[in-house]
Amino acid sequence: MKKNKLIDLRSDTVTKPNQSIKDSMYHAQAGDYAYGEDISANELVDYCKDLFQVEDALFVTSGMFANRAAISSQTSPGDEVITHYNYHINFFDSAGNAKVNSIVFNCIHNDSGILNIYDVQKSIESKPRYKIFSQVKLVTIENSINGFNGKIYPIDEQIQLYHYLKNRGINLHLDGARIFNAHVESKVPLSEYAKYTDTMSCCFSKGLGAPFGSMLLGKKQIIEKARTMQVWLGSGYHQIGYYGAAAKYALENNISRLKDDNDLAKLLADKIKTLPQISLIYPYPETNILAFSIKSLNVTNDDFITECQKYGLLLFPWLEGHIRAVVHMGITKNDIEKSAEIIEVVVNKFSN
């Protein structure tokens, strides 16, 4: 098979700014953000506050930073945070949160990826809550759910959980790194997701195609605490408006096109389903992420990934025997068809 264009499905973080985003950066009105004088960054914050209908918002470097700041501003050292073991906040960042926030994760293990009230209550009641025990101060959810094939977290489940937690004096944080992919598919308003959280995050440098940044959104008192933590950790800004302008342009122009990414992920899933030697790990992809199992091939992730790369396809090794593909704005229908051909060739090679 001839190798042509390199098709990169490792993640939607590999997106590159298009010319329009670069132009927006060139025309940005930057000032000293620390003094509140960066016009483009301030415009981005105001735009997000209006888009999500929240009291306040904080422009931060990354989704990981947004999540850490959310935890920091709603917990104290030794407190407990309930989450799912497969959410990014634990799967990728348990060590970072242990170091920076000194909190304890109480992870729920289930096959749905959804934190229902029963699971959360069981976790709360899994140990005594005397003074010497960690106290549950925060629950975190994720939408879309990276580790569950980009699954959309149902808004009704989120609302039920939010009200349950409020009755117990516990806050709710939503890791919305890919909330825009969920939004275009579910048609749930972004403000509805934000309404039933204390804080939530969103990312600009994934499917939206901006080069940098995330936003932490929520109640003013919490965001003020997060703003202090941002400076304490050496992540305050000065002339950040160039990135602010890029993110604002991406929000204004690139949200609706995420539906194309979701649809192309479904197309790739359809083609993978025709190959009997491999299988989708989760049901049909709801957004732009899909994962498939190569366990029946008796080949390592690294060998499978390396062979695909020889033909011009980059994929991401997840758990052993599981391969992830993520569709983004740099991927076309032809790329998906070519990717399916490469996967079939590699599967057949390791089947013999």
Image (cartoon, rainbow, N blue to C red):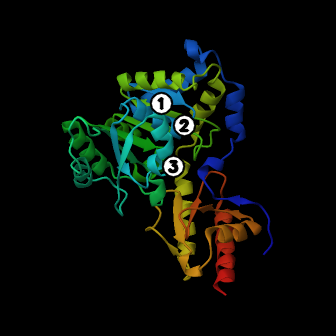
> On the rendered structure, is 154 left or right of 36?
left
* Residue at x-position 37% and y-position 39%: 173
Secondary structure beneath dot 3 equals loop
Decide which of 93, 267 is in the foreground and name it.
93
Residue 70 percent coordinates (x, y): 42, 33
Residue 323 percent coordinates (x, y): 57, 66
Give the amino acid at mark 2: Leu
* Residue at x-position 52% and y-position 65%: 291
User: What is the distance, in whole Å, between disc 2 and disc 1 at their CAs?
Assistant: 9 Å
Give the amino acid at mark 3: Phe
Residue 12 percent coordinates (x, y): 60, 51
Secondary structure beneath dot 2 equals helix
Residue 19 percent coordinates (x, y): 72, 39
Q: Earlier in the sequence, mark 3 or mark 2?
A: 3
Count residues near mark 3 (Cα–Cα under 10 Å), then give few for <14, some for 14-19, many for 20+: few
Question: In the figure, 228 relative to 213: above or below?
Answer: above
User: What is the distance, in whole Å, between disc 3 and disc 2 at their CAs?
Assistant: 26 Å
Q: Are marks 1 and 3 in contact (CB under 8 Å)?
A: no
The dot on residue 92 is 3
Q: Earlier in the sequence, mark 1 or mark 3?
A: 1
User: What is the distance, in whole Å, between disc 1 and disc 3 at their CAs?
Assistant: 26 Å
Residue 51 is at least partly visible in this image: no
Mark 1 sits on what residue? Answer: 48
- Residue at the outermost front position: 132
Question: In the figure, 351 relative to 285: above or below?
Answer: below
Count residues near mark 2 (Cα–Cα under 10 Å), then give few for <14, some for 14-19, many for 20+: many
Mark 2 sits on what residue? Answer: 251
* Residue at x-position 49% and y-position 37%: 99
Considering the image in quadrants, where does the N terminus appear? bottom right
Count residues near mark 1 (Cα–Cα under 10 Å), then give few for <14, some for 14-19, many for 20+: many
